[in-house]
Image (cartoon, rainbow, N blue to C red):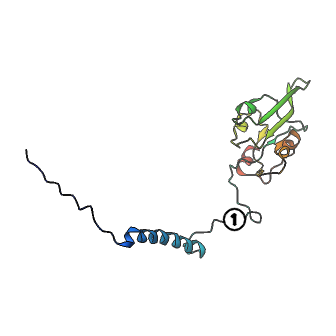
Amino acid sequence: MKMIKVISPPLNIQKRWWEKVYILEIFRGLWVTVTHLFENLFNLRKGRVGITYQWPETPKPLPDTFRGEHRLMHREDGTPRCVACYCCATACPADCIEIIAADTGHDGVEKYPVVFNIDILQCVFCGLCVEACPCDAIRMDTNKFSGADFEGPKLILNIDYLMNNHPEGVGKVSEAIY
């Protein structure tokens, strides 16, 4: 068997003072940051547009598939299209939909919602309630979104608000549904 001699580098290599405090690495990182700063500050990037929206004055355009506030659809006679089947409340992962049903008294529709509340504070805007509704009674195509409020009860949408919550502009997805 042949022995191999391993030579290791000396352990007492003296670094210069700027290598000890990582001056070169700090300046390399700062160079990247400063170049991005001036590119964004003076818009030196060719062919690219700024991405900042001055929000209250010019709102950001919403995509066609945006899921905004809920609304309840109504029939021609003005009654809610909802038949209180509880499919939307069952499908809701946040458990934010409260429905109390009552009998209508006619043969065509058995039940209607007396109470239909959606707690926006709990809602995750997933759209599963819209998908689960068998009679297309609930939609999320209003292009509205409620950000915040100082009073919690205002963020619980009741049946009167949901019936009168008309969309602000109609997207392509809503046009296909109508």
Number of marks drawn: 1
Residue 93 in the figure: left or right of residue 144: left
* Residue ID at (71%, 37%): 94
Residue 96 picture location, percent across and down: 76, 37
- Whether residue 59 appears in this view of the structure is yes
Badge 1 marks a residue whose secondary structure is loop
Depicted 169 relative to depicted 162: above or below: below
Q: Quadrant of residue 134?
A: top right
Choose between 122 and 114: the one closer to the eye. Answer: 122
For the C terminus, the image quarter is top right
Residue 93 picture location, percent across and down: 69, 35
Residue 78 in the figure: left or right of residue 50: right
Depicted 175 relative to depicted 46: above or below: above
Residue 24 picture location, percent across and down: 41, 71
Choose between 106 and 84: the one closer to the eye. Answer: 84
* Residue ID at (45%, 72%): 27
Choose between 170 and 122: the one closer to the eye. Answer: 122
Residue reaching furthest to the left: 1
- Whether residue 109 appears in this view of the structure is no
Residue of label 1: 53
Which amino acid, by three-letter code, is at mark 1? Tyr
For the N terminus, the image quarter is top left
Depicted 65 relative to depicted 29: above or below: above
Residue reaching furthest to the front: 12
Choose between 170 and 131: the one closer to the eye. Answer: 131
Residue 119 picture location, percent across and down: 79, 40
* Residue ID at (85%, 28%): 101
Would you call the spot at circle 1 few (<14 residues within 10 Å), some (14-19), or many (20 or more)?
few
